[in-house]
Image (tube, rainbow, N blue to C red):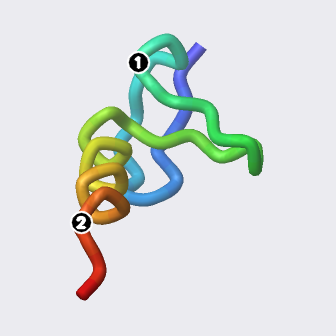
């Protein structure tokens, strides 16, 4: 089954997407970008 990334709209197989607690799907590219921005130290 194919689903769309809720951030960039890319159509991917469901196994290639990350399911968030909100029920939305993110592709690995968007998910990694979100992780990178969360891990930056706040000054």
Which of the two residues, 3 or 22, is positioned nearer the viewer here?
Answer: 22
Counting from the top left corner in percent of width and height, residue 24 is at 65, 46
Q: Residue drawn 41% across and 52% down?
A: 9
- Disc 1 is placed on an element classified as helix
- How busy is the neighbourhood of tag 1: few (under 14 within 10 Å), some, or many (20 plus)? some
Vertical arrangement, residue 35 with respect to residue 7, above or below: above
Which of the two residues, 43 or 2, is positioned nearer the viewer here?
Answer: 43
Residue furthest to the front: 43
Q: Which residue is mark 2?
A: 40
Counting from the top left corner in percent of width and height, residue 26 is at 47, 42
Which of the two residues, 22 or 15, is positioned nearer the viewer here?
Answer: 22
- Disc 2 is placed on an element classified as loop
In this picture, residue 25 sits left or right of residue 26? right
Quadrant that contains the C terminus: bottom left
Vertical arrangement, residue 9 with respect to residue 4, above or below: below
Q: Which residue is mark 1?
A: 16
Counting from the top left corner in percent of width and height, residue 3 is at 55, 31
Judged by depth in the image, the label closer to the viewer, 2 or 1, is 2
Image quadrant assignment for residue 1: top right
Q: Residue drawn 28% across and 64% down?
A: 37
């Amino acid at each position: 089954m194919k689903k769309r990334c809720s951030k960039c709209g890319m159509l991917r197989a469901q196994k290639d997407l990350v399911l968030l607690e909100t029920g939305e799907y993110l592709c690995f590219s968007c998910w990694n970008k979100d992780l990178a921005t969360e891990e930056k130290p706040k000054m």
